[in-house]
Image: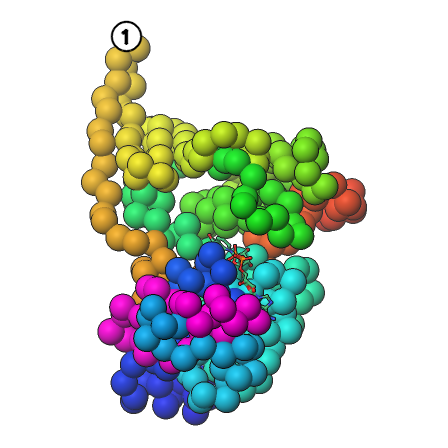
Amino acid sequence: MTGQATRRMQAGPVRIGVTGIGIMGSNHARVLSGLPDAELVAVADPDQEQAQRVASFLGCKAVGDHHALLDLGLDAVVVAAPTHLHHPIALDVIAAGCSVLVEKPVASTTEEGREIIAAAREKGVTLMVGHVERFNPAVRAVKDAIRGENLLSIAITRVGPFPPRMSNVGVVIDLAVHDIDLIRWFTESDIVEVQPQTSAALAEREDIALLQFRTASGVLAHINTNWLTPFKARTVHVATSKKYVIGDLLTRQVTEHFDYRPDGSYSTRHLPVAYAEPLRAELENFLSAVRAGRPPEVTGEEGVASLEIAMSCLPGASAAQTARRRAVG
Ligand SMILES: NC(=O)c1ccc[n+]([C@@H]2O[C@H](COP(=O)([O-])OP(=O)(O)OC[C@H]3O[C@@H](n4cnc5c(N)ncnc54)[C@H](O)[C@@H]3O)[C@@H](O)[C@H]2O)c1
């Protein structure tokens, strides 16, 4: 780590700003304003009315863009602007010697993502990607329940209605990327085979996807995601050779079924799930990584690896990409 990280380890709260104060950025700013390890200095958005509204509510400054944010002498910045802007903004933030938490997906392309990683490494600053679902206590409970087990399959459902504002990405890059990250994290293995089915039923880009994967460790995985369901549902089912774990990521109920007997009976246990706001846990992890100069829970490399799998599921992805994954496996 460079002098930037060293300075942080000795100083008080991390001086931080948020750029892109829409739905996600407002949440980051709200949580940061209540964290003892952070000093929320300012929020930035070209929509000055929105930036001003959030800033006056949270008691920080409002500025028009990340350049003005960086002029305030920060230690770290959260980038929650639209995805196509992650790359240029993150590079500017890193060039100024600041650590950066980039919302998911890390960038629009894997090349851009790799450039962000290289820049952060070169400058010696912390780079984290906002795969917030990893910090969902129900996801943590599933991870604990399957630790050390012989994993066989994972099925994840993430469905709901169309988002209020459509961005320029479809459901695979917007939603499935969360679950690709979870599959890689649960299995601690790379995805080597991809069998995607996608369709643009009502939107310009894919709005419904059924994605199948095989990991290098031999686990089969399935993602069912769409924007065509009137209600939100987020569930994870994991089959191991000894138990079947079901997690509801919205109600945060996690149950395991085990001890299967020849008469068809089995045991069921509801697992304890901690109470925690996932975004708060994510930001605490980022701040402690910045202060300690150690890697955060979700690194840039992991963000790019999940983006690469998601991109290989898109209708335009070449057969060569899928074949390359098979060859790796
Ligand atoms: N981790 C999650 O669960 C999660 C959830 C939602 C969104 N996201 C991600 O967060 C990002 C933002 O999504 P959102 O839903 O909050 O979008 P949004 O449209 O609600 O907000 C984006 C904001 O960025 C602002 N903006 C535009 N140009 C800008 C610029 N040059 N500099 C700074 N701000 C600029 C817009 O004015 C807007 O206020 C996306 O990358 C998205 O994928 C992550």
Q: Quadrant of ligand 1?
A: bottom right
Q: Is residue 237 above or below residue 327?
A: above
**Percent x, y of residue 170:** 64, 45
Please give the name of the residue rendered at 39% of the width and 60% of the height, measured from the top-left corner: 27
Residue 148 on the magenta segment? no
Q: Which residue is mark 1?
A: 263
Q: 216 or 179: nearer the eye?
A: 179
Q: Residue at x 33, y 29 (%)?
A: 243
State the quadrant of the N terminus.
Answer: bottom left
Q: Quadrant of residue 236?
A: top left
The C terminus lies in quadrant: top right
Q: What residue lies at 40% left-to-right and 67% top-to-bottom?
A: 54
- Determine whether, in the image, residue 48 is placed left or right of residue 167: left
Instruction: State the SS at label 1.
Output: loop
Callout 1: few (<14), some (14-19), or many (20+) C-alpha neighbours within 10 Å? few
Callout 1 amino acid: Asp
Residue pictured at 43% horizontal, 84% vertical:
74
* Figure check: 77 above or below 134: below
Position of residue 250 relative to residue 48, above or below, is: above
Residue 209 drawn at (x, y percent): 62, 35
Tell me, yes or no, if residue 102 can be seen here.
no
Q: Residue 253's image quarter?
A: top left
Magenta segment: 29-54
Residue 197 shows up from this direction: yes
Q: Is residue 39 magenta?
A: yes
